[in-house]
Image (cartoon, helix red, strand yellow):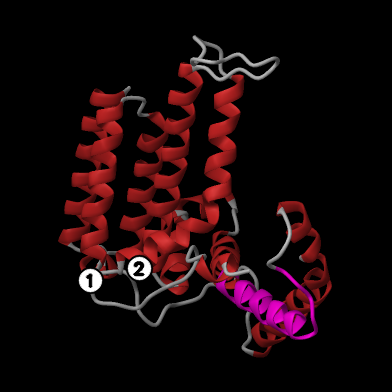
Amino acid sequence: MKFLQDITLGQYLPGHSFLHRLDPRTKFLSLLLLMVVTFLVQELRAMAFLWLFFFFCLILSGLSWAYVFRGVRSFLWLFLFTACLHFFFTPGPSLPLFPLGFINITWTGVAKGLLVAAQLFLAILFSSLMTLTTSPLQLAQGLEKLLCPLKRFRVPVEDFSMMTMLAIKFIPILLGEANRIIRAQSARGVDFESGGFFQRVRNLLPILTPLFHSVFKRADDLAIALLARGYISGAKRTHLHDARMAGRDYGVLACVVGFMILELKLGV
């Protein structure tokens, strides 16, 4: 089950690149705007500009290109499934040699399927780029500051940001625990690699019980650790390093907004 080791979404790689130094609020807002424009564009040239913008951000991150793209490889089944849905169920002129009985693939479906798959691919890449260059603590602090106005409506912003940070932090932990269990089961003779897709899914069943046991144990240990450190839900807390937006953050937001307007003119 090598695909579990390839998932990088939720992981953080320390560094001193331009993206690492940006305020987490800048990254959150930029990601939100880029997500919106990614799923709104419908033209090929607009999508091409989005990909060029992603590669520009990848250069600014200082991360290994192979590492970033290897982390998306585990989501290929999602892209293929989404594309196939559009291939077979979007009406339009049929491809040569189709329809074959009840199977029909249309040109419109192929174009739409490839576009949606590319949009999902790009959305996951942008999300991975943010988590890889922002620590979970910075993500929680940035989300808390962004949602700060909701405190007037008695929304538990601190608790929500804490849960978000823990959820992101638990992704690589659970993947590592799943890999440890798979190695232990493989040493006992369980074969996870042979067979078809459904056989491999059935082979995963032996790891579910120990994985859930580990999840609940870690959650219980975390709750005890929080109580031991005096954590109180809803209490006002301070931060060791208070995040402040600098001039580069406002410049990046202005560039992202300008790029979004240009994309909407080109691709909608």
Q: Which of 2 and 227 is in front in this view?
A: 2
Residue located at (84% from left, 72% from top) = 209
* Residue type at the position of mark 2: Thr
**Residue 92 % position (x, y):** 51, 10
Assess whether residue 183 is covered by the magenta stretch. Answer: yes
Is residue 27 rendered to the left or right of residue 140?
left
Tell me if label 2 and label 1 are in contact, CB under 8 Å.
Answer: yes
Residue 133, numbered circle? 2
Residue 17, numbered circle? 1
Task: Classify mark 1: helix, strand or loop.
Answer: loop
For disc 1, the neighbor class at 10 Å (few under 14, some 14 to 19, many from 20) is some
Q: Which of 239 and 23 is in front in this view?
A: 23
Assess whether residue 210 is covered by the magenta stretch. Answer: no
**Residue 17 % position (x, y):** 22, 71
What segment is highlighted magenta in the picture? 171-192
Is the stretch drawn in magenta largely helix, strand or loop?
helix
First in sequence: mark 2 or mark 1? 1
- Visible in this render: residue 21? yes
Is residue 201 rendered to the left or right of residue 252?
right
* Residue type at the position of mark 1: Ser
Instruction: Name the quadrant of the N terminus.
Output: bottom right
Is residue 21 rendered to the left or right of residue 39?
left
Residue located at (60% from left, 53% from top) = 154
